[in-house]
């Protein structure tokens, strides 16, 4: 952004250079964009248009205007799904950020076995979801599972009073939040590590000269310097939490791929409306609500980044 | 001085204890998976549990091989993941360079459009997409999954964030030296962004490797299926065969583990060698 | 780092071996779809004089390896029609009908379609994916009365779109060893719900890992809710559901008293009903007759430890005839866009007809066309319980479909499933859930 200020070529030259640069820029973007446009954008736009229609996937389409959105306003099932998704997001985002940042700071220190610990923390992220969900499912099992058996053996609390984890409507969301944090913290830790290593050490030295202690250094150097990283991490976390589907299906759904009230999330609701009730229009309307929610969050963050950057 | 030292040692011990606990939390499920994969169904849930089964049942690993064509599944998944990752790396880093380092009309609007689509769940447009792909004759081909996965907006977003941190002066200097933009991308940006590229590699590879809804819809022929749908179908069909499920899960982990271990150098050391402004 | 390299090498080597194995195994690996292909390969040579054009049919199915009758059916058909080869498209049992509808909407080239449930069938009919069969039935002289009235139950606006080949009904499976050990008499073929409840309570014992549950309800809605329709006074698509209350009360009480396993646990841990039965953890289980074939096979394979078992007729409410039970049909249909419609229809005719029924019955599965002979061929199977009561249990007097045909059945089913889930997990009270069903389904039916 600063490069244009450095040189001051004549207006005509600037114009030509600009045009050429635009052309070059588009040539850079084209390979990805063409694939992206054909395979994502086109179907996406079609899906968005669907929200104003009624369509069962085969029969003629009828235009229903904003009926689908009016129906949303009084759909208790949708509200429940929205509520569950928000609760899940509110739990996952801070928990993951705190864990990831803490781990990154610990593992940025010069300690023995650092590489080992980094590898270990990242491992759950690369592991196959289907496989680890199956493991956690068995481990969380209220009566037979090792977790409750362990708690029972060491605290003496009878099984009936121990958390029911995924099987209990009160604990289900907490269970999935813990699982998600376990699965993904390593990934965000790596991003934070990259961020931490980009911080100029002189900033810390300067702070030390000013007599700052560790906490002060963290607050006045680490946190502000990591802002772009946190921006990225927060956006990705919020988006991924709003879009969550696979984790819930693998953790909670039985053989029929169905989720109960306590664990029904937005994308599941959308999928169900589209494929089980064959109401693609109404499903698209729900998807648009989801999209707008995420867009708002993204825009707020984006403006925040601009102000700070 | 002495006091400070002691404080340092105490802190260090504390850090190690913390790390060991964390490592345990991260690893115990895998240990359990491995241990259960060598047990009979009825022994999987005994408590107190035996981490090392008295007579390990290697038979489980032979049995799964007979029940599902794991070899084909692993081959298919590896092939898809490798191709998708390669395309994703090239096209994303290419596009990201323009978004991060070039001035052009419509840049911000285009970029916002890009990240906006990250926010849309795939499930919302998978039907129109499926219809379109089928019309193109791509149903039941691996090409469908490649087209689906290789051009994501996420890769562009991630690479752009990394490129933003590379000082503009570097590019400017290269331009003065007579390098054109493509040259700058190839000779300066690419080598500089090794850590970012390896992050994206792992991310894309892992995502493609672990994706199941896409392959489930597009790949219905047995010889085309990937390990995740294979595994999920296996779990659904043999839901009470805990030992076998765990053995299959272990096998599904191995290839990702290899990729990860061979690239982790770039994470663990490489990240430090380049000045990336977070 | 240095130490990692050898490790990597070893792993890479191991992977190479895996890949090697995989490749070597490639040919036998599609073991799963063997006979058809093999015969097909041999077919052209054998068939050359006849010059029949070879046809490849794609058949949408689920759980290929866990289902006994696909291969025998295909083998029997291909033996008679060597120019046809049949390819399985396994869409998995979870969400099968949804997957099928998605595939068809995308124009997938499937020919023969298995219809797993009525709501899914209703959806496919609405989407015009299924070939109407009336004219084919009359031109081929197919006698639909053989199906015991089931084809009428899947008729939509006077048109039939599928023919059943399997007709399952619900019975009680019980573990004789557990009953013997407890010194309790086996369940009888004329058992009221109250007697069944009493028996289940008598059979419950132990705790922790040794706990034996008197009965077991799988997480399907039909395993609990549908006791309510056995008296024939109500159906599940009526729009009012107050009649379900006493049945839910009965089962919830059992759950509270630890007579059966907790619903939520079963559901989230994806515990399959077969596992608990195999492992001698439950005395009685209400389940569909499809479990007979599986149980026989698993006992032979040594996977089911419940080797001494029996079958009894479904428990019924007071004043209802013994042998009244729930039924579910599995049918075949033909994709209306199939390029091999004629061959597909012919295959469907074979599977759903008397010849197919004989093949299906031989695998211990109850075909849609049943008569004494078919029942006898099942009860005389090696591994079927030898006592007369178990044989008698396969005779039904009245069967109600789990989900009757209704053009809104998919939506109704969704609501019923959700409310069932809420009741069983105690998310809501029975009264609240019933009020919810009444209002939401009332809305759907409007």
Image: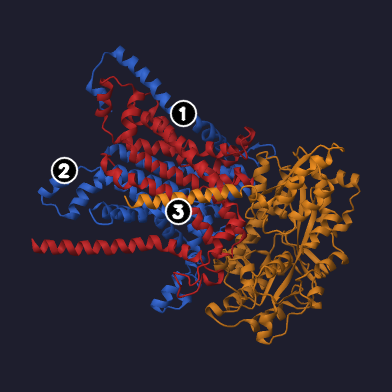
Chain colours: A blue, B red, C orange
Q: Residue furthest bottom?
A: C183
x, y (%) of residue C38? 74, 47
Residue C321: give its label: none
Label 1 lies in what chain?
A
Question: In this view, which residue lies farthest toward the left?
Answer: B1
User: Whole-Å distance between the Cαs marked 2 and 3?
Assistant: 38 Å
Q: Residues within 10 Å of mark 1 (few under 14, many from 20)?
A: some
Upstream in the sequence, badge 1 or badge 3? Answer: 1
Numbered label attached to residue A31? 1
In the rendered structure, the residue with mark 3 lies on which chain? A
What number of labels is visible?
A: 3
C264 left or right of A236 in image: right
Quadrant hosting residue C73: bottom right
Q: Earlier in the sequence, mark 1 or mark 2?
A: 1
Indicate the secondary structure of the residue bearing disc 1.
helix
Residue occupied by mark 2: A202
Asked whether residue A270 is in view, the answer is no
Residue wearing tag 3: A127
């Amino acid at each position: 952004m600063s490069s244009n200020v450095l040189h001051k070529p004549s207006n005509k030259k600037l114009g030509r250079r600009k045009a050429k640069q635009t052309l070059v820029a588009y040539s850079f973007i084209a390979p990805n964009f063409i694939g992206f446009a054909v395979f994502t954008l086109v179907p996406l736009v079609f899906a968005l248009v669907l929200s104003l229609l009624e369509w069962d996937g085969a029969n003629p389409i009828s235009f229903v205007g904003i009926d689908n959105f009016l129906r949303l306003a009084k759909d208790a099932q949708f509200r429940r799904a929205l509520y569950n998704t928000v609760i899940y997001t509110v739990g996952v985002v801070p928990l993951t950020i705190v864990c990831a940042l803490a781990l990154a700071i610990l593992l940025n220190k010069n300690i023995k076995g650092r590489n080992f610990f980094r590898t270990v923390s990242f491992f759950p992220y690369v592991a196959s979801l289907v496989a680890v969900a199956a493991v956690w499912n068995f481990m969380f099992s209220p009566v037979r599972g090792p977790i409750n058996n362990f708690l029972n053996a060491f605290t003496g609390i009878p099984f009936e009073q121990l958390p029911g984890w995924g099987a209990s409507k009160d604990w289900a969301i907490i269970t999935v939040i813990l699982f998600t944090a376990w699965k993904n913290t390593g990934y965000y830790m790596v991003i934070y590590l990259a961020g931490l290593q980009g911080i100029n050490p002189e900033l810390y030295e300067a702070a030390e000269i000013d007599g700052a202690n560790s906490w002060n250094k963290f607050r006045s150097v680490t946190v502000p310097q990591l802002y772009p990283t946190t921006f990225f991490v927060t956006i990705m976390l919020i988006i991924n939490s709003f879009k969550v589907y696979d984790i819930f299906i693998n953790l909670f759904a039985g053989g029929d791929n169905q989720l109960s009230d306590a664990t029904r999330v937005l994308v599941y609701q959308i999928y169900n409306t589209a494929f089980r009730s064959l109401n693609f229009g109404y499903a698209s309307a729900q998807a648009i609500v989801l999209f707008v929610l995420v867009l708002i969050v993204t825009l707020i963050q984006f403006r925040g980044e601009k102000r700070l950057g | 001085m002495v006091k400070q030292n002691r404080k340092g040692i105490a802190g260090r011990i504390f850090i190690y204890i913390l790390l060991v606990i964390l490592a345990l939390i991260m690893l115990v499920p895998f240990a359990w998976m491995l241990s259960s994969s060598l047990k009979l169904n009825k022994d999987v849930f005994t408590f107190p549990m035996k981490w090392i089964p008295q007579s390990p049942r290697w038979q489980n690993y032979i049995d799964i091989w007979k029940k599902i064509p794991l070899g084909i599944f692993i081959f298919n998944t590896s092939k898809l993941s490798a191709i998708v990752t390669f395309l994703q790396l090239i096209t994303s880093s290419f596009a990201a360079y323009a978004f991060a380092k070039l001035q052009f009309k419509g840049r911000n609007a285009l970029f916002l459009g890009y990240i906006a689509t990250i926010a849309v769940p795939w499930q919302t447009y998978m039907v129109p997409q499926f219809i379109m792909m089928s019309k193109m004759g791509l149903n039941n081909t691996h090409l469908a999954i490649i087209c689906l996965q290789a051009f994501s907006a996420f890769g562009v977003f991630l690479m752009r964030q990394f490129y933003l941190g590379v000082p503009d002066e570097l590019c400017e200097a290269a331009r003065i030296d007579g390098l054109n933009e493509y040259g700058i991308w190839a000779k300066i940006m690419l080598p500089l962004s090794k850590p970012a590229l390896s992050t994206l590699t792992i991310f894309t590879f892992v995502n493609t490797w672990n994706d199941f809804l896409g392959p489930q819809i597009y790949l219905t022929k047995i010889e085309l299926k990937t390990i995740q749908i294979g595994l999920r179908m296996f779990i659904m069909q043999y839901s009470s065969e805990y030992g076998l499920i765990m053995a299959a899960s272990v096998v599904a982990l191995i290839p990702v583990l290899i990729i990860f271990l061979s690239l982790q150098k770039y994470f663990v050391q490489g990240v430090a060698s380049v000045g990336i402004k977070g | 780092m240095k130490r990692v390299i050898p490790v990597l090498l070893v792993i890479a080597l191991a992977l190479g071996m895996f890949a090697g194995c995989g490749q070597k195994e490639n040919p036998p690996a599609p073991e799963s779809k063997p006979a058809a292909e093999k015969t097909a390969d041999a077919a052209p040579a054998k068939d050359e004089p006849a010059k029949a054009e070879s046809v490849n049919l794609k058949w949408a199915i689920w759980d290929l390896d866990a289902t006994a009758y696909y291969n025998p059916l295909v083998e029997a058909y291909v033996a008679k029609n060597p120019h046809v080869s049949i390819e399985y498209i396994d869409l998995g049992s979870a969400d099968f009908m949804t997957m099928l509808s998605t595939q068809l909407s995308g124009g997938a080239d499937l020919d023969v379609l298995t219809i797993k449930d009525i709501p899914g069938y209703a959806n496919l009919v609405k989407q015009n994916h299924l070939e109407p069969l009336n004219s084919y039935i009359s031109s081929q002289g197919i006698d639909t009365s053989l199906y015991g009235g089931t084809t009428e139950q899947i008729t939509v606006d006077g048109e039939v779109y599928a023919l059943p080949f399997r007709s399952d009904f619900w019975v009680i499976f019980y573990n004789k060893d557990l009953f013997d050990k407890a010194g309790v008499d086996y369940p009888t073929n004329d058992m009221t719900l109250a007697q069944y409840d009493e028996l289940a309570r008598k059979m419950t014992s132990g705790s922790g890992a040794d706990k034996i549950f008197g009965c077991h309800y799988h997480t399907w809605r039909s395993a609990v809710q549908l006791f309510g329709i056995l008296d024939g006074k109500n159906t599940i698509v009526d729009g009012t559901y107050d009649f379900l209350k006493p049945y839910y009360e009965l089962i919830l009480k059992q759950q509270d008293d630890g007579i059966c396993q907790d619903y939520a646990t079963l559901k989230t841990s994806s515990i399959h009903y077969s596992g608990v039965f195999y492992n001698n953890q439950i005395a009685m289980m209400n389940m569909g007759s499809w479990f007979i074939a599986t149980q026989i096979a698993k006992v032979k394979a040594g996977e089911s430890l419940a080797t001494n078992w029996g079958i009894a007729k479904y428990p019924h409410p007071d004043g209802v005839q013994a042998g009244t039970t729930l039924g579910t049909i599995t049918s075949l249909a033909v994709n209306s866009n199939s390029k091999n419609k004629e061959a597909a229809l012919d295959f469907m005719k074979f599977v759903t007809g008397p010849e197919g029924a004989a093949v299906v019955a031989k695998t211990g599965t109850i075909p849609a066309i049943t008569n004494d002979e078919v029942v006898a061929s099942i009860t005389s199977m090696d591994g079927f319980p030898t006592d007369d009561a178990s044989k008698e249990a396969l005779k039904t007097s009245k069967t109600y479909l789990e989900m009757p045909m209704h053009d809104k059945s998919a939506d109704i089913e969704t609501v019923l499933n959700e409310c069932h889930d809420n009741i069983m997990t105690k998310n809501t009270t029975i009264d609240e859930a019933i009020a919810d069903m009444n209002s939401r389904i009332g809305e759907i039916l409007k």
